[in-house]
Amino acid sequence: MSGMLIVVATPIGNLGDLSARALDVLATATVVYCEDTRHSRQIFSAHQISAAGRLRSLHEHNEAALCDEVVARVANGETVALISDAGTPGVSDPGERVVAAVANAGLIVTTAPGPSAVIAALSVSGLASDRFVMEGFLPRRGSERAKRIEQLGLEQRTAVIYEAPGRLVDTLRELSDRLGDRRAVVARELTKLHEEVARGTLSELAKQFSVGDVRGEIVIVLNGAEAPPETDDATIVDALEVELRSGATLRDAASSVASTLKAPHRRVYQLALDIRRDNPH
């Protein structure tokens, strides 16, 4: 029989969220690679599954080194399960490199889907969920963090962000200062005993969570930016004529105006062609 790698989603809190299929995979897999064997043994014990020496540690520090081992096991016909401490492997958790390695070797990768903090938080947020972007953890500091937040300022899709309890208030305040006081949701300890879903503007949420200690796993769901108003044709034509009178080529004028006015390049170029047709000299 052909071997396979099975990406298995495990509970983000409530142990009852482990699917029947996931239970079967964990019970029958030849080997189970997990982020923390101690944590995973708790899941196995809670569901009366025997680990029987099948647990292997795979985390962010050793994942790259283990790719060849996992590929070899799958190629040898073994059923290999991959889990993280909570949720779906590869989504802000180890697993992406191993999955890519097995897939690139032409071997089978499949999934026993289930819990995901991203989808759980998005589903209860009440914000637009038809189009969204997963940001994970923002960079801690410096220019990389500033760049990512600047990109969020233009992002029209709902954004899902992970954050640590100790940094939540500062992040909410920074997002409010940099992006404006958008609507957002803070989902804390989802599916657990002390689950909390707080809704409001970024500044309101920052004020709410500045009182007392914040604990647990946290997801911020951020409302997308409003679409910029569309620039009218007359404004584009005026800008193009300025560029063309200064000696710019048709292509360079269109590129410059499209960039400056944040207008679709194809539309700007067509207007430039119209100008040239109406004024051939």
Image (cartoon, helix red, strand yellow):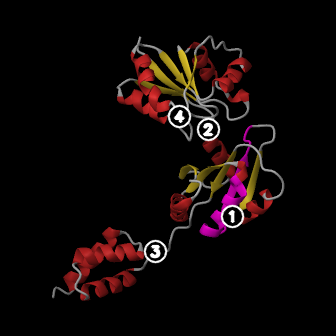
Magenta stretch contains residue 264:
no
Under mark 3, the amino acid is Glu
Say which residue appears at 63% left-offset and 20% top-offset: 23
- Residue 199 % position (x, y): 74, 57
Judged from the image, the secondary structure of the residue bearing numbered disc 2 is loop
Q: Which quarter of the rendered picture does the N terminus lie within?
A: top left
Q: CA distance from mark 3 to mark 4?
A: 47 Å
Q: Are marks 1 and 3 in contact (CB under 8 Å)?
A: no
Q: Is residue 155 visible?
A: no
Q: Residues within 10 Å of mark 3 (few under 14, many from 20)?
A: few
- Label 3: state its secondary structure: loop
Sequence-earlier tag: 3 or 4: 4
Element class at badge 1:
helix
Residue located beneath label 3 in the image: 230
Which residue is identified by label 4?
A: 61
> In this orientation, which residue lies closer to the viewer: 35 or 9?
35
| Dot 1 amino acid type | Arg
> Mark 2 belongs to which amino acid?
Ser
Q: Nearer the viewer, mark 1 or mark 4?
A: 4
Magenta region, residue range: 167-191
Q: CA distance from mark 2 to mark 1?
A: 26 Å
Give residue 236's position: percent from left, percent from top: 36, 81
Disc assigned to residue 116: 2
Location of the C terminus (image quadrant): bottom left
Q: Earlier in the sequence, mark 1 or mark 3?
A: 1
Query: Would you name the residue on which mark 1 appears?
Result: 173
